Every structure is written in C-alpha cells, then in structure tokens.
Image (cartoon, grey):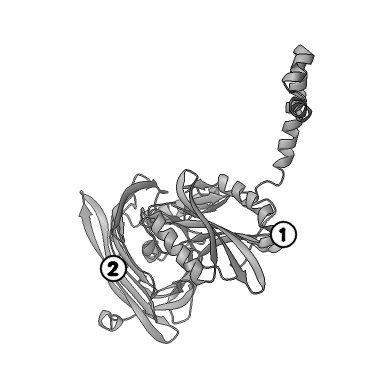
C-alpha cells in the first residue's frame, strides 16, 4: 500500500524522508506543474458577462457560444439564449418565469414540474441549492423533441421577491456528461441584483432628466386629465385602458397623482391590472400601489404590491397566493414604474431628441431600460414615437396637444395589439 501511494505521489512522506530539505524543491516543482495544469483546465472558460435587467441577473455563457437571434424551439419566456458553436442543438437560455410567487420557491418549482410533465418531460431529479447566495431549485429532466432525445438542466433562482428567473441548459443526451460541468461553472459565476448601466446609457438617462426637468414648477397640460383607450387585436376589441392624472401635494412636495386600470381578455388568457402612483415633479420619489391578475385557464394568480422609491432604493410589500413579503432592493435614479412608460413619453413633451432613455422598475424591483427613438410624423395623423422596453418595441401616437391617442405593441407572450383613444364608456364596454 505504501509503495502504491509513493508511486502516485512523488513528493510523499517517503520522498521527504529520503530527500530531507530537498523535498521543498520537489514540492515547489509539483505546485508549478499543478498551476500550469489548472490554468490549462480553465481554458474552456466563460465568455463576457451578460446582464439582464428584467431579472437583475448577470451570468457568463461559455466562451465562444453565440447569441441566438430567436428562442430555442418550444421555449417560452426567453430573455436571451446562446448556442454551442460545435453543436447547434446544445443551448443555454435565461428564462423569466411569468407568474411571480413571493417567498414560495417550492410552490413555483412544483408548478414548473407540472408544466414540464404536461409537455411530455420526464423529471429525473430535483434538489435545492444556492446560486449567488440566493435560494434556488434544480430540476433535471429528459425530453424528446422530434426524433432527438435531450436532457434539460433547469435552475430556478429566487432573484427578487416577485421574480424567479431560470437558467436553462438543453443538451442532446449523448453530450450531457460533457456539458453539465460547463453549465455548473456558469452557475458558479452568476451575480444577482445587477443594475449597472453602460456610460452611453447613463448619458441617455441624464439627457432625459434634463428634458423632463423643463416641466418642473408647472403642470404639464398633456398629463393632467383623464384618458381612455380601447384595446384591439386586429379588428376585434379585446380590452380597455383608462387612467387619470391630477396635480397634488405629498409632504409639501408637488406631485403627479396617477390612477389607472388596464384589462385584456383573449380567449382563456386574462390580464387585469390597476395602479395608483404618486411621483414628485423632479422624479426623485414615488409611491405606488399595484394589483395584477393573470390567468391562462390553468393558472390564476393575483399579485398585490405597494411601496416607495426613494434615494435609489425600492421598498415594497408583495402579496400573492396567501404569501406576503416585505423587502428592499437598489434601483437606478429616475426609475419609473414599468406600467407608466407612456407617462415618461408624455412628460418629455413635444421636444424630442433621439436616443433618450429612462429606467423602468417593476414593483418587485426588476429593472429594464426604456429607450426612445426619434419622433416621426404622418400627414394628418398623430406624431409617432418609437420606444423599446422589455424586449419589445412599441409605437406611441400623440395629437397636437401631446395627448396619447395611439399605442401599438405586443404583450402576453408576443400578441400584437393596438390601443386607440375613445370615450371611456365606449372603451369599457
């Protein structure tokens, strides 16, 4: 036994006995060789960090993997995905779970398992783990797509109290043993609650701040008042949106007081949200109350949230499915509630500049960036402004008084919808 150990470990105790002080040289040489081997082992390293503001998650895909221009087959909720250049069937995706379940990771993991099995997947193993010090749940399951057999490695992460992103690896069964260790290296490098912006984005946000500040000290007549819109899918009316904005004071500060509701019903899919928001004229503080119900005929969840955004921190309470949570998270300056991107567009007024940007936050403090494109004009029609948020593009149309009269975009998994101004009684029918 001793001889075998000595053969495997040249600088073992036996070697040290023989070499005495020379053993230090042997140990040093061995460490140098191991260092070289460790560097070589890390060469199939990770690539540049990818930051997803919708989940405030940052991860590094394997080096050389290429960003996909469309989601992998059969995958929904994909924020970003990468493919292995050596095998296009192997891919890594960041998925955002659409139904927020605060403080109940096991419940949403159970729902995820049901969805996997309903889609024909066979769950092989499940267990709890930590990713970037956040409670997480790992599910490994097999699945057939066409004639090919895959193994999927999904990790559900409790990122925010009302958002659970999934890092998802899909790999052909024959390659799973080789690719799984690479994916685990990706998991080990994950960072959470990343809200940093690039220098160009910070400059665009500052330009928006200066433009919006021109309204300080007086109320923007395009904002104050009531508006209502019917929501259409092609020629069929599927919902409505109504809101009103008033001038007011909170703690001796001039504020905009906003209250609104939006309801969309398409076959079995329902989205019903209402909100009350108070925003100081200089955009430095805001309070919010929001209630969102989503249903698809199988899952029906209502999320209620309330809180305040002040000093680049969001403090909120979230309730869903009988669960409640209170917490706080950092947010960038000038961040507005994400359902109010039309408010940001109207606030900037008729003096448009290309490339403006403003941070958007959800009540759960997930961060995105609203980007404005240069305004366009149509003869006899509304002035059109293009905006981009949550990975989708929208067109907003404003009349000569800067009132929002048209909106085109996509919601609920990519459905193309159009919002048209109309009397409130007609809109709510």
Query: In the displayed structure, would residue 396 be above or below residue 313?
Result: below
Q: Is residue 400 visible?
A: no
- Which image quadrant is residue 336 in? bottom left
Q: Residue at x 39, y 60 (%)?
A: 100
Coordinates of residue 378 in the picture (x, y in percent): 48, 78
Coordinates of residue 357 in the picture (x, y in percent): 47, 57
What SS does tag 1 mark?
A: loop
Q: Contact, CB < 8 Å: mark 2 with mark 1? A: no
**Local crowd size for mark 1, using a 10 Å CA cut-off: few (<14), some (14–19), many (≥20):** few
Q: Quadrant of the C terminus?
A: bottom left
Per the model, the C-alpha gap separating discs 2 and 1 is 48 Å
Question: Quick one: 362 or 266, which is closer to the camera?
Answer: 266
Residue with the most extreme top position: 21
- Which image quadrant is residue 65 in? bottom right
Coordinates of residue 71 in the picture (x, y in percent): 58, 67
Q: Is residue 390 visible?
A: yes
Coordinates of residue 108 in the picture (x, y in percent): 41, 60
**Local crowd size for mark 2, using a 10 Å CA cut-off: few (<14), some (14–19), many (≥20):** many
> Which tag is nearer the camera, tag 2 or tag 1?
1
Q: Which residue is mark 1?
A: 85
Question: Quick one: 191 or 283, which is closer to the camera?
Answer: 191
What SS does tag 2 mark?
A: strand
Question: Quick one: 236 or 25, which is closer to the camera?
Answer: 25
| For residue 333, side relative to residue 32 (left or right) | left
Q: Residue at x 69, y 53 (%)?
A: 178
| For residue 176, side relative to residue 313 (left or right) | right
Q: Which residue is mark 2?
A: 260
Q: Quadrant of the N terminus?
A: top right
Q: Residue at x 49, y 73 (%)?
A: 414
Query: In the displayed structure, would residue 252 be above or below residue 72?
Result: above
Q: Identify the disc placed on residue 45.
A: none
């Amino acid at each position: 036994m001793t001889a075998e150990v000595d053969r495997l470990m040249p600088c073992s105790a036996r070697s040290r006995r023989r070499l005495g002080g020379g053993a230090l040289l042997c140990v040093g040489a061995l460490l140098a060789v191991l260092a070289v081997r460790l560097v070589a082992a890390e060469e199939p390293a990770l690539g540049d960090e990818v930051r997803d503001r919708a989940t405030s998650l940052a991860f590094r895909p394997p080096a050389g993997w290429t960003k996909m221009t469309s989601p992998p087959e059969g995958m929904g909720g994909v924020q970003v995905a990468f493919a292995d250049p050596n095998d296009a069937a192997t891919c890594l995706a960041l998925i955002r779970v659409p139904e927020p379940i605060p403080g109940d990771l096991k419940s949403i993991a159970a729902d995820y398992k049901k969805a996997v099995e309903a889609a024909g997947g066979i769950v092989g193993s499940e267990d709890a783990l930590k990713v970037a010090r956040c409670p997480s749940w790992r599910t490994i399951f097999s699945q057939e797509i066409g004639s090919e057999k895959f193994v999927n490695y999904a990790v559900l992460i409790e990122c925010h109290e009302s958002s659970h992103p999934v890092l998802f690896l899909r790999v052909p069964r024959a390659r799973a043993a080789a690719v799984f260790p690479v994916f685990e290296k990706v998991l080990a490098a994950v960072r959470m609650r990343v809200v940093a912006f690039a220098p160009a984005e910070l400059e665009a946000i500052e330009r928006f701040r200066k433009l919006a500040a021109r309204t300080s000290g007086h109320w923007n007549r395009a904002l104050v008042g009531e508006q209502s819109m019917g929501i259409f899918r092609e020629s069929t009316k599927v919902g409505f949106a109504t809101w009103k904005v008033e001038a007011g004071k909170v703690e001796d500060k001039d504020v905009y007081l906003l209250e609104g509701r939006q309801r969309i019903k398409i076959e079995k899919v329902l989205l019903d949200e209402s909100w009350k928001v108070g925003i100081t004229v200089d955009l430095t503080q805001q309070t919010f109350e929001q209630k969102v119900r989503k249903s698809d005929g199988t899952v029906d969840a209502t999320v209620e949230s309330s809180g305040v955004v002040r000093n680049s921190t969001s403090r909120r309470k979230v309730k869903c499915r009988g669960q409640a949570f209170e917490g706080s998270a950092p947010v960038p300056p000038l961040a507005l509630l994400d359902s109010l991107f039309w408010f940001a567009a109207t606030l900037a007024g008729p003096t448009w500049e290309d490339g403006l940007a403003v941070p958007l936050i959800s009540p759960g403090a997930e961060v995105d960036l609203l980007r404005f494109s240069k305004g366009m004009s149509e003869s006899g029609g509304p002035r059109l402004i293009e905006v981009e948020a949550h990975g989708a593009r929208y067109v907003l149309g404003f009349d000569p008084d800067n009132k929002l009269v048209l909106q085109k975009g996509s919601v609920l998994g990519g459905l193309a919808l159009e919002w048209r101004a109309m009397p409130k009684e007609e809109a709510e029918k």
